[in-house]
Amino acid sequence: MQKCIRCSLCKMVPLPTVLNPKYADGCPASHLYHFHGYSGSGKSIMALSLVNGRIQVDQALADIAFACTACGLCDVSCKFIMDAERHAVNIALREHIVEEGFALPAHRAMIKNLQEYGNPEGKIGVQDSSWARDLGLKVLPNQKAPILLFTGCMRCDPGAAEVARKCAILLKQAKVDFGILQGNETCCGLPAYWTGHRGVFANTANHLVDMLDDTGVETVVVLSGSCLGALRSKYPEYARAPRAKVLHITEFLAQLIADNRLRLRSPVRRKVTYHDPCYLGRQSEPPLTWKGEQKVARGCMTYTEPPKEINRGVNGVYDPPRKILRAIKGIEFVEMYRIREYSYCCGGGGGVPLAYPDLARSAALDRLGEAVDVGAECLVTACHHCRANLSKSQQSLDKPLLPVVDIIDLVYEAAEIDRGERM
């Protein structure tokens, strides 16, 4: 926190990466509210003031601290010039606010549902497994398979459940031996992480890891970018990582396509761009372990012995989705201006859609405008939170800016699916 020099780099993508000055902003909250307190730097200053006893937690502070999509752009942008954990400070600040009794009312029902029913939407009844109807999928752990297809709470969203069904059909087409959890599946718990409910997140994570380990699978394939960020990056810190290898569906499908096990023969004639989800990209790096000493030279310059490796967001899942898009015949792929570790958040994370719908909508429309400005006819993503918020945010417009689809939709369209397996 003390390292912050108020350079405001946390508000934008690093200047050497700016390709269009219209799209230089990196922080959705700072972009909308135009006040330093909403930036990563502002939150570090507030957190330091709490630590030093200069201020106390109140509702005003909570309202600013939670007006953030928890995307982590401030973290990787700050690390362009220094070693400072802006995202970790943001989350620790939220957790402290919740401990002090100032959790946002807008989040309480979601957290209660997560505790009681294992998903943020509450009790959902029989439709929780209807996406897998008539597919003859193995149900783990009663049956055995080396691979688990984990859908989490995607079954609560009809659009996402349809994506899950298409994915299962694709894996069957490629003759993959896999199974599902079906009615026993729970949310990965990331909404609790986002909203500062540390204990709820840790309990959810431990419960899910036990469930995954009990299946005995070698590989867990997750459908949502958010789930990958939770299991690969946050679970080792708050609970423990599953014994199985965890992959995102784009990583798994890209390998199936490269191995010629899944053939994409049907052309999809569309000009598309790709949105990097925050928790599939910069927030999916596993935490680094380091033992050493931080020292100070000349009274102000810090350094570490031995040198400390830094998570800069560069090792997220960026290439597999792009390899898939380039493997589909007829696709014309164009990049947006803010991509990979400096991707602009869609506004769908951090508990923002529930508590700050204006912020969620502002971020989404900014991102959609960027897709339009690069000439895309369709925006593709690989996270159901992104797809949902980007699509919903256009409803108030006279005319939608452009369609938003999951990358699975395009793969399904391009694959030659057996007639008996179609939806």
Image: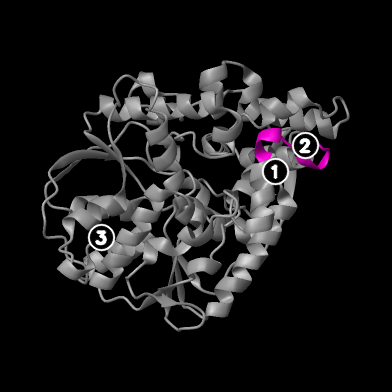
Q: Are marks 2 and 1 in contact (CB under 8 Å)?
A: yes
Can you say whether 270 is above or below 40 in the image? Answer: below
Q: Report x, y in % for residue 282.
A: 48, 46
Please report the bounds of the magenta region as a residue range: 98-107
Q: Mark 2 sits on what residue?
A: 97
Q: Which mark is residue 332?
A: none
Label 2 secondary element: helix
Quote the CA–CA distance across marks 3 and 1.
Answer: 39 Å
Q: What residue type is disc 2 on?
A: Ile
Residue 423, disc: 3
Q: Secondary structure at mark 1?
A: loop
Label 3 vs label 1, nearer the camera: 3
Q: Which residue is mark 1?
A: 196
Q: Measuring 30% from the left and 26% from the top, which residue is drawn there?
A: 400
Q: Is residue 328 above or below residue 167?
A: above
Does residue 163 sit above or below 36 in this rendering? Answer: below
